[in-house]
Amino acid sequence: MRASIITTAFIAIEGAHAWGSLGHTTIGYIAENLIDKKGEAWARDILNATGNSSAGYLAGVATWADSYRSTAEGKFSAPYHFIDAEDDPPTTCDVDYERDCGAAGCVVSAIANYTQRVQQTQALSAQQVNYALRFLIHFIGDITQPLHDEALALGGNTIPVKFNNKTTNLHATWDTSIPEKFVGGYSLADAKEWAANLTMEIQKGKYKKQAKSWFTKDSTISDPVASAMIWARDGNAYVCSEVIPDGVPAVQGMELSGTYYADTIDTVEMQIAKGGYRLANWLDQLAAASKKVHSKNFVRAAAPEFDVDALLPAPRELSRAKLARQAVGWDCGHKH
Ligand SMILES: *[C@@H]1O[C@H](CO)[C@@H](O)[C@H](O)[C@H]1NC(C)=O
Ligand SMILES: *[C@@H]1O[C@H](CO)[C@@H](O)[C@H](O)[C@H]1NC(C)=O
Ligand SMILES: *[C@@H]1O[C@H](CO)[C@@H](O)[C@H](O)[C@H]1NC(C)=O
Ligand SMILES: *[C@@H]1O[C@H](CO)[C@@H](O)[C@H](O)[C@H]1NC(C)=O
Ligand SMILES: *[C@@H]1O[C@H](CO)[C@@H](O)[C@H](O)[C@H]1NC(C)=O
Ligand SMILES: [Zn+2]
């Protein structure tokens, strides 16, 4: 009992910092709202979530990967939360898989790896398949946060800024401060309400038309690297246009809860909406590719041939940005 209270408290504190917990759980709830029947049944089966809990079967596990990476067992997955694009914002923004995905993997290779693994129900254990789905739920969220697609200053982690007079950094501002200021909290109930609003905008509001461009026929589980690269480039482009359009000096040490917040909140909302929309569509595709043999027992199709060892770019000398990331043990202030 005591142990479980401590565990819950620990996760709650991580959550308060940790897209932050509000961003990830909102993405989970949006996907729950948009997923099709088959997708829901498939996901509930893998996640062993048959009942109805207030946490939600996707939202409830959306921050698991952030807790897991701070365990000894899960440490290997820390580089999977981002791709360090070595571009030159605000002049040039772009992501190059060969250049930017590190030897230890990145969010793009991770989405590809876990898209494969979640389909390998014959070769992998139920727990490995379950972890694969939890990772996907999280990483399809992380990749929409512009600073998870940027190497500069370790994704903005080493750019000090102020928010509501408190010292923080640019990465955490995007992960947490901006979303929490908008919503006024970070509880599951807050996430559910935000998700309901964003779902409405996707279905019949301001995102109705553009949502189709968030997940096109080029987003396909048969080419997960190319699909995730489209999402990484989309997120990264906002580093130039919204995150630091006037360069680092314009934000360094500055109070960002005023004009900067007002200028960026629309983009933050849209990126969260994209995460939920893409996640629902991705899971629908995975479920459609699986075969249901009888009501309680799913046998998923054997995964297509996919050389996971060939997933990562060829080994090469570490760049300055990769050395800097390695020097902070992948994690640094990057708790989210
Ligand atoms: C699935 O959930 C049920 C009910 O909560 C639990 O008894 C069972 O141990 C779980 N199975 C796995 C594989 O986690
Ligand atoms: C969960 O609850 C909702 C609303 O009460 C209901 O529509 C849905 O069918 C329930 N799902 C499951 C799997 O029990
Ligand atoms: C794929 O995921 C497994 C399980 O988490 C991990 O052991 C393996 O290193 C990953 N492979 C790549 C290429 O990321
Ligand atoms: C920051 O603190 C100053 C001095 O206490 C105060 O005047 C100002 O309103 C505060 N700004 C914000 C955004 O909280
Ligand atoms: C959701 O929409 C309602 C109705 O427009 C609004 O009052 C509420 O503040 C919104 N909440 C969030 C978190 O967007
Ligand atoms: Zn993450």
Image (tube, grey):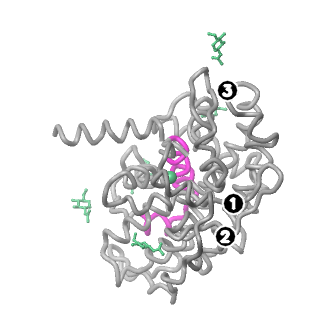
Foreground residue, 82 or 43? 82
Q: Is residue 156 magenta?
A: no
Q: Which residues are magenta?
A: 22-43
> Which is nearer the N-term, disc 2 or disc 3?
2
- What residue is at 63 percent from the left and 34 percent from the top? 178
| Whole-number angstrom distance, CA of label 2 to CA of label 3 | 34 Å
From the image, tell me which residue sits under label 1: 86
**Looking at the image, which residue sits at the far bottom?**
305
Q: Mark 3 or 1, which is nearer the eye?
A: 1
In contact (CB < 8 Å): disc 2 and disc 3:
no
Give the main secondary structure, helix, strand or loop, of the magenta stretch.
helix
From the image, tell me which residue sits under label 2: 99
Q: Along the horizontal axis of the image, is 285 left or right of 253? A: left
**Which numbered disc covers residue 257?**
3
Query: Regarding mark 1 in the picture, which secondary structure is present there?
Result: loop
Point out the image quarter for the N terminus: top left
